[in-house]
């Protein structure tokens, strides 16, 4: 589940939806909260002003009737204060006074005031205001009595009297509720609309992109036919431009590959034909060697060797060019490797008498490869081994069965080896080891062997110790012998 | 180079059925193959194009055609199609500079019996003649 979510959020569609969700959840929610808070503050200020006005009137009433300040409460004083409070109290705005001793002077005609007394005990911060220099407290104290809501204010006078007001804000609270519900609905509708719109928009972008990806995946070097995805209505301009640009790119690539193919075919023909003619006439000359002097015979032989070398190099270069263009085809077949190695060993024994040993099991071992190409690789590796191993050295060709069921075909020698830092370099084209001075070669043998091995789903690996010898091996998947 | 020999060969053809047709637009290849084939004891017919080849198989009893692929006008593949359309009974061996496996497969599926890449031509020729001509004589 976690992986699926992570994967979804990695897509264009996922990110659009995440962005839309973030904007809504954070942005819209913050905006809504600020709006509600602002409206609430404005309503409270209105009630503050109203309460302050009434409290000022009560205070003036008390002053007029010449009430004393810090003296202990007397019945007369209580009656005076109560009279002033009751003169200005209404059902919607209740006023009562608390003396410094803690005694509450309550209006008699408003029974609900007793229920409000517990809310009039929390200390608040204060600020100065009003003609009597009241400490007007923060009025965020809301009391719920039955179905009604009252906003409790405290006005602290310099004379030490606390004027408490409780304004009925049931209607206002109800309005707040309606506003909050309306905002919540608006939020939900906007969220849903945004998600739908973002989903549709993101599909309009990701759909053509996915089709473009599918068309690109369908390309391969042999059939580089790019079908640009059909342009649906409403696809963003940038996607259309990207598709067109890709179409042009593929067209250029196709042309380039076609030119490369034609060039390879042309080169193949134009190089191989003269080589064939030279090889043919040299062969005829060497057959008439009885009519040649020794010097002429040696010249003919030398020319034949060079023509053979150039023929091989031409073939290698063409194979490498095809491999670069993804056009090197090597058909895989079941190859009886033991038989192939035995035949190869017999042929090479006549060329390199006494220098080779064969290491193959008694039983049949078959693998998926190409007989001709595998033989080509092994001949190349043997040729290298002979060149870089002294007469007294050992060259072994064979195969070994690995524990995981795969088959390792190898050519190993006790020759001069390859310096460690050159093992990768010698597999590059036209690159030869630093110890190959005086030894003939084009530097293509290992690179073509690497390319051919890859074409047969194998890989060439080289282990070598400088001064001790080299082991070159290819690993193949084994297949059933019958 | 071998004008006299060619003339002799050509006059012999009128009395001796031709055996091997060499179809290649390159005159050097044709000349070289002519000499080799004569040395191998077979009678060559030289054709510079597919059209000449079609004329030759009507005129002579051609047993083996050594056919190039890359020729102007009618290329080797078109020649194979024409030979099949005319129900040619002999053997066709492709002799070409192209070593693509795809070309090899295509040629063999179009009716060729063998496919030789040109640098190997002269080393392969005796074997080809043994397999397709001499063993059947």
Image (tube, coloured by chain):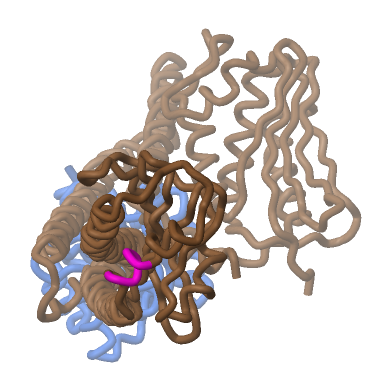
Chain colours: A brown, B blue
Secondary structure character of the magenta stretch overall = helix
Reply yes or no: does residue A86 show up in magenta. yes
x, y percent for residue A193: 25, 80
User: On the image, which quarter does residue A379 sit in?
Assistant: top right
Residue occupying the point 49% across, 85% down: A146
Q: Quadrant of the C terminus of chain A?
A: bottom right
x, y percent for residue B133: 45, 71
Residue occupying the point 14% across, 49% down: B3
A68 with respect to A145 (left or right): left
Q: Quadrant of the N terminus of chain A?
A: bottom right
x, y percent for residue B125: 43, 56
Total numbered badges shown on the rendered structure = 0
In front here: A128 or B62?
A128
Question: Is residue B93 in view from this perspective?
Answer: no
Q: Is residue A38 above or below residue A204?
A: above
User: On the image, which quarter does residue A177 sit in?
Assistant: bottom left
Q: Residue furthest right?
A: A362
Q: Is residue A347 above or below residue B92?
A: above
In front here: B125 or A147?
A147
Which residues are the magenta region? A83-87
Question: Is residue A60 in view from this perspective?
Answer: yes
A374 with respect to A344 (left or right): left
In front here: B7 or A386?
A386
Residue occupying the point 12% across, 60% down: A238
A292 with respect to A2 (left or right): left
Reply yes or no: does residue B117 show up in magenta. no
Residue occupying the point 32% across, 43% down: A276
User: On the image, which quarter does residue A422 sit in?
Assistant: top right
In front here: A214 or A140?
A140
x, y percent for residue A358: 82, 40
């Amino acid at each position: 589940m976690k992986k699926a979510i992570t994967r979804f959020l990695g897509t264009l569609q996922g990110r659009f939806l995440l962005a839309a969700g973030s904007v809504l959840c954070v942005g819209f929610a913050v905006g809504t909260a600020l709006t509600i808070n602002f409206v609430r503050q404005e309503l409270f200020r209105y009630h503050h002003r109203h309460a302050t006005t009434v409290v000022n009137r009560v205070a003036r009433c008390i002053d007029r009737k010449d009430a004393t300040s810090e003296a202990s409460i007397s019945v007369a004083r209580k009656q005076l204060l109560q009279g002033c409070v009751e003169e200005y109290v209404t059902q919607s705005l209740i006023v009562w006074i608390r003396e410094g001793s803690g005694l509450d002077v309550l209006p008699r005609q408003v029974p609900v005031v007793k229920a409000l007394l517990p809310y009039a005990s929390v200390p608040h911060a204060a600020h100065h205001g009003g003609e009597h220099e009241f400490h007007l407290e923060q009025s965020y104290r809301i009391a719920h009595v039955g179905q009604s809501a009252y906003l409790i204010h405290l006005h602290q006078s310099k004379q030490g009297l606390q004027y408490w007001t409780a304004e009925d804000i049931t209607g206002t609270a109800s309005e707040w509720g309606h506003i909050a519900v309306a905002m919540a609905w608006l939020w939900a509708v906007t969220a849903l609309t945004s998600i739908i719109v973002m989903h549709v928009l993101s599909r309009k972008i990701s759909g053509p992109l996915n089709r473009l990806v599918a068309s690109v995946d369908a390309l391969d070097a042999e059939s580089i036919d790019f079908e640009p995805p059909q342009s649906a209505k409403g696809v963003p301009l940038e996607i259309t431009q990207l598709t067109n640009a890709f179409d042009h790119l593929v067209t250029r690539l196709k042309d380039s590959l076609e030119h490369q193919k034609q060039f390879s075919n042309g080169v193949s023909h134009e190089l191989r034909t003269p080589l064939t003619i030279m090889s043919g006439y040299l062969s005829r000359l060497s057959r008439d060697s009885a009519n040649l002097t020794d010097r002429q015979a040696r010249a003919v032989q030398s020319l034949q060797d060079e023509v053979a070398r150039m023929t091989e190099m031409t073939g290698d270069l063409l194979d490498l060019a095809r491999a670069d263009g993804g056009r090197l085809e090597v058909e895989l077949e079941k190859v009886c490797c033991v038989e192939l190695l035995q035949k190869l060993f017999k042929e090479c024994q006549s060329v390199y008498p006494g220098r080779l040993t064969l290491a193959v099991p008694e039983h049949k071992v078959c693998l998926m490869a190409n007989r001709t190409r595998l033989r080509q690789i092994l001949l190349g590796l043997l040729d290298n081994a002979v060149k870089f191993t002294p007469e007294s050295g050992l060259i072994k060709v064979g195969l070994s069965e690995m524990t995981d069921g795969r088959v390792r075909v190898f050519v190993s020698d006790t020759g001069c080896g390859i310096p460690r830092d050159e093992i990768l370099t010698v597999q590059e084209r036209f690159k030869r080891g630093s110890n190959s001075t005086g030894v003939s070669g084009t530097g293509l043998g290992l690179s073509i062997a690497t390319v051919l091995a890859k074409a047969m789903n194998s890989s060439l690996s080289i282990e070598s110790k400088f001064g001790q010898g080299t082991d070159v091996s290819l690993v193949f998947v084994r297949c059933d012998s019958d | 180079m071998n004008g006299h020999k060619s003339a002799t060969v050509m006059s012999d053809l009128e009395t001796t059925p031709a055996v091997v047709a060499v179809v290649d637009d390159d005159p050097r290849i044709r000349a070289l193959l002519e000499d080799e084939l004569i040395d191998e004891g077979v009678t060559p017919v030289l054709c510079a194009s597919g059209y000449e080849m079609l004329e030759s198989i009507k005129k002579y009893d051609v047993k083996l055609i050594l056919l190039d692929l890359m020729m102007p006008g009618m290329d080797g593949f078109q020649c194979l199609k024409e030979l099949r359309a005319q129900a040619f009974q002999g053997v066709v061996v492709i002799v070409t500079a192209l070593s693509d496996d795809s070309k090899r497969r295509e040629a063999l599926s179009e009716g060729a019996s063998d496919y030789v890449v040109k640098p190997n031509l002269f080393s392969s020729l005796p074997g080809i003649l043994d397999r397709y001509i001499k063993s059947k004589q």
